[in-house]
Image (cartoon, helix red, strand yellow):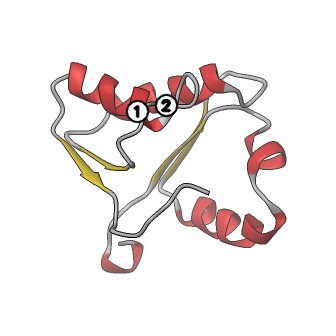
Amino acid sequence: MLDLGGQVEVVLPAADYRVRKVKPDNAVAFEELIGRASTVRTLPFEHSDRDAYMAASEAVLGTVDRMVAVWDGQPSDGHGGTGDVVAAARERGLPVTVVWPTGAART
């Protein structure tokens, strides 16, 4: 998408997100994406936790016209999971497209 002229806006849930959540194998790709983002916003949470994740999702939902969710349709395994975000999008009246490829599995 970026190579076709699209933009990426990043909402990080908390100040510690990169250190706490980005695994070493993904660090280069994470930094590249952040470097190419048109906007990077970090929410005012100190720690990346379920409340911060849900707040980040709510912030994103407040700026979009539709949602595409990569989701297996299962309930969230805690506050702020994909199921909660899909429910919040639907409550806002946003169109939601769910994508779950055949053969995909949670890891």
Q: Which residue is mark 1?
A: 83
Q: CA distance from mark 2 to mark 1?
A: 5 Å
Q: Is residue 9 left or right of residue 88?
A: right
Counting other residues with Cα less than 10 Å from the Cα at mark 1, is it few (<14), some (14-19), or many (20 or more)? Answer: some
Residue drawn at 40 percent across, 72 percent down: 2
Residue 41 point in image, percent of width and height:
57, 38
- Quarter where residue 31 is shown: bottom right
Residue placed most toward the observer, 27 or 100: 100
Residue furthest to the bottom in view is: 3
Q: Which residue is mark 2?
A: 76
Q: Secondary structure at mark 1?
A: helix
Quadrant where the image shows the N terminus: bottom left
Q: Is residue 95 left or right of residue 43?
A: left
Q: Secondary structure at mark 2?
A: loop
Is residue 59 shown above or below 20? above
Name the kind of residue labelled 2 in the image.
Answer: Ser
Name the kind of residue labelled 1 in the image.
Answer: Gly
Residue drawn at 72 percent across, 31 percent down: 48
- Would you say the residues marked 2 and 1 are in contact, meaning their CB atoms lie under 8 Å apart? yes
N-term mark: 2 or 1: 2
Residue 33 point in image, percent of width and height:
58, 65
Residue 45 point in image, percent of width and height:
70, 22
Is residue 28 shown above or below 55? below
Residue drawn at 74 percent across, 41 percent down: 17
Q: Is residue 19 left or right of residue 102?
A: right
Residue placed most toward the observer, 83 or 10: 83
